Image (cartoon, grey):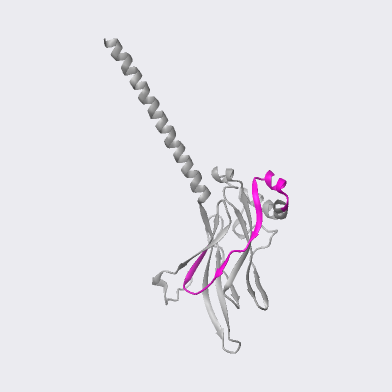
Amino acid sequence: MSKRLGIRFYFVSLLLVIVALVVLKAYKENQVLRKIVERLSADSRVAQVLVTKVQSDPETKKTSTTIKFLEFDSRMNPLPARYFTFSGNIIQFQSLVIRFDDYFIKQAHPLKGKSAYLFMKAFCLTDAGAEIFEINKINEVPSGYRVQEPGNIFEGLLWRRFWSFALEPKEAGKMGIKNAQIEAPGSKFVPGMLYTLKIEHDGGLRIDAEPLPKILEGEAIPAG
């Protein structure tokens, strides 16, 4: 009798262990899946824009808009701010964007774990033509990557061969690149709003706009 109870206890214990392992495996799989989904839907802040001045000319009846463009490097440190003045307020940012295969996004690859971008120009289209300010040159490593890091050589290669990747799918595939293209996200820039440019890890650039905090209204904040 005691032997039967011992065998039964053994099988029950074994069954409980198997169930626990199955539950643990399912939990780990769900955790991995959640991380993959988070990586595929994640984004990173790459720049912020603020309208610092709007000036009207009574003679020409035209209004100019000055924006402050603040780009962030790969470690989220702010780069020197730039100021651009346009005769309109519909402003766009011409950019090169390289998307990598989802496999690298899912794996959080150190160099290919999110789309790569390069701001080239800020511009505004007017009746008289385009008003353009240069931000980066295509053959240079982007502003935020001018440091001696392992990714520096890789970044330089990406931008030097951008058009090869854009026009030759086989070459792009060898580098794990899904596609390479020019994007020009834009918005209407008005005072009292903070515009944040973000790079989607599995996509392109986008601009999010939100009102400035109420505490800043009417205040002239000195530079730090």
* Count of all numbered marks drawn on residues in the image: 0
Residue drawn at (48%, 48%) of the image: 38
Is residue 203 a member of the stretch shown in magenta? no
Q: Quadrant of the N terminus?
A: top left
- Relative to 150, 15 lies left or right: left
Is residue 174 a member of the stretch shown in magenta? yes
Query: Percent position (x, y) of residue 80?
Result: 57, 66
Q: Which residues are magenta?
A: 167-196
- Reply above or below: 92 against 158: below
Q: Quadrant of residue 70?
A: bottom right
Residue drawn at (51%, 44%) of the image: 36
Query: Percent position (x, y) of residue 4?
Result: 30, 12
- Reply above or below: 168 against 132: above
Q: Quadrant of residue 187?
A: bottom right
- Reply above or below: 28 against 60: above
Query: Percent position (x, y) of residue 64?
Result: 58, 79
- Reply above or below: 78 against 154: below
